[in-house]
Image (cartoon, helix red, strand yellow):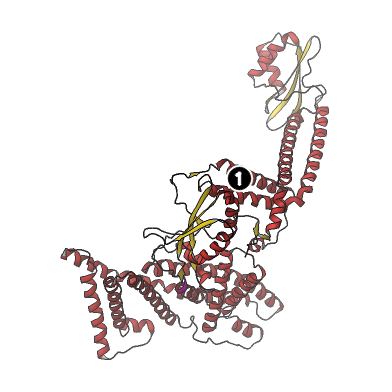
Amino acid sequence: MAVLQMQRISICALKHDRKAILEKLQSMGMIEMHQVAQDEAGFEKMDTQSAKSSFEKRVQITENALDVLNQYTPEKKSMFASLEGNELIDKKTMEAAAAKQEAVMEVAGLLIADHKKIAEAQAEIVKRNTQIEALTPWMSLEVAMNYPGTKKTAMLLGTMAAETTLEMIYGKLAEDHPEIEAVDISVISQDKDAVYLSVFCMKDQAADVENTLRTAGFSRPVVSTEQIPAKQKEELEEQIRQIEQTIADIRGEIISYAEDREELKIIGDYYRMRAEKYEVLGTLPQSRRTFIISGYAAKEAIPAIQKGIGDAYDCVIDVEELKEDEEPPVILKNNGFSESVEGVLESYGLPHKGEIDPTAIMSFFYVFFFGMMLSDAAYGAIIAIVCLIVLKKFPRMSAGMRKSMKMFMYCGISTMVWGILFGGYFGDVVDVVSSTFFGKELTIKPLWFAPLNDPMRLLIYSMAFGLVHLFVGLGIKGYMLLKDGKVLDFFCDIVLWYIFLIGLILMLLPSEIFASIAQTKIVFPAAFVTLSKALAIIGALGLLLMSGRSSKNPALRLALGAYDIYNITGWLSDVLSYSRLLALGLATGVIASVVNQMGSMLGKSVFGVILFIVVFIVGHAMNLAINLLGAYVHTNRLQFVEFFGKFYEGGGKPFEPFHAETKYVDIKEEK
């Protein structure tokens, strides 16, 4: 339950050590760069944009080359590849790859060039297929499409509407040019869109014939050949076969580069690190002989930085406390259990300066409520065991994924405990199986009570747990006020609300309304009843008079106090929100029971057993998935809206250290 104390660290070193110091800091990953010496006399910044762009371009080339390899020879990955994390290599492996970077980049260039050749070749195939498609209607033509005719005759090729007949064409010619008689029209082919025609006529009459035909919809073909269409088609098909062979040869060449995949990945990450280093280099104030690095680091990391940099290089390291108005980046530090839910807090917002880290307290309630919502021992065991196996089998998964797996493992354990308390084991599968297939009903009794048999009891406990959750949130707000020395605010905004709420709760418990809900009557001694009323009145009067204390106008002050008392409706709404603990807990059990009943419909038979197994597996898998998601979403809501709403704002900036930002490999850190 801590936000690490941050300090500003500045390093002034000799310029000839700049490269080595930056690489060391990048490998350590302990400083977030934040330069302060911006306009110091004698210092200026180096323009590194060109070098940075060059490295980023090389990164893109390696990525394109890897995409080409993955397209033609996909890398074999397991279905759990996302959990395996990056490959871990030592510094010597990275240096060895960097030594032959130009050769690797040459391979990358060849891969990209080969891919371009294949794309161009495929475009040529498409072009030739288009030509073949255009030639297809003319396959029965026994002369070239651009046949010029004889000395006195001409050939016209073209298309007309599909419904056009020879009689219509001849009729049109006779109508427009009755003097033309030497015309021969043949149908080469016909489809649903057009009729394909060859027209032979005298050369001196060709223009008149074509003009007449055009008025009837005649148009020249888009393709023209110097040879017979059938022969042209054969040549085009042969060209396609040659191009396809070329593509196959190039594809084989690309596949032969598969063994260079790992080096491409390493070199890509090498250039990523260099681009990041040059980006930082461009922000450093530098003189002729020295340079300055400044940024944030955790106080507990300062000794390691001083040892790794100060002892190895001629430099001056200055460490100073942050200024009053300086908002540092945030690093959380919690125990192994609580850190598992840090991702939940980060999704809401990290604590800003002056706020406490609520992770430790939230983690208990988070796991507690999650298990209560899912509340099935078998489901909980499955979740916990699966997460534990994943954690053991994939030790190099990302930090965020590891935290999530640990969180769900703890939530699975909590679910298992609540399932034992409520007697839920795949719903009522023990009862159904024993009575259906063995003729004798066997029941595992709940350690506490069965919510399906006593839902109102669970509702009471749900709201009671919710009230504790809200009171803890209000208490944390009080702690923060005392920490800042705001004693009056603590009394007026915290203590008076506690007095008011406790008084109202004690008044509610012996009431008829509560008795009808809880199915039990609570009787307090008369003095206790009087005390509860006194607490409620004192709290209400205190809030009425003190909530608007910032205003000197008496009327406005009372109005603000009355409005604050009206916020009791918000408290009621918050408490009722915890009824979702009942709703989701019952939903899990009811759906599980329905699944079991559906599976047992065919009774004690071979088909009944088969049906039960199928329905059991599918039904409970779906029930687990749906209610797991529901429990996760609604547990988050209880923290974000009800709990954090009492004391927490968030909005802190996460710590983003200067470190080796890689995509494919991780480099072993030096100890």
The amino acid beneath tag 1 is Glu
Specify the segment rendered in magenta: 349-360
Instruction: Specify whether residue 577 is painted magenta.
Output: no
Q: Report the residue marked by disc 1.
A: 56
Instruction: Specify whether residue 352 is painted magenta.
Output: yes
Prevailing secondary structure class for the magenta stretch in the rendered image: loop
Number of labels in the image equals: 1
Estimate the x, y position of residue 602 in percent, counting from the top left. 65, 77
On screen, 436 above or below 3? below
- Local crowd size for mark 1, using a 10 Å CA cut-off: few (<14), some (14–19), many (≥20): some
On screen, 497 above or below 315? below
Estimate the x, y position of residue 454 in percent, counting from the top left. 46, 83
Which of the 4 image quadrants contains residue 433?
A: bottom right
On screen, 194 above or below 313? above
Residue 534 visible, this angle = yes
Toward the left, the furthest residue is 554
Q: Is residue 343 left or right of residue 257?
A: left
Estimate the x, y position of residue 296 in percent, counting from the top left. 48, 58
Residue 183 visible, this angle = no
Which of the 4 image quadrants contains residue 646?
A: bottom left
**Front residue (pair 514, 55):** 55
Residue at image coords 64%, 69%:
390
Quarter of the image that includes the C terminus: bottom right
Q: Is residue 517 left or right of residue 71?
A: left
**Front residue (pair 515, 69):** 69
Give the structural element (helix, strand or loop) at label 1. helix
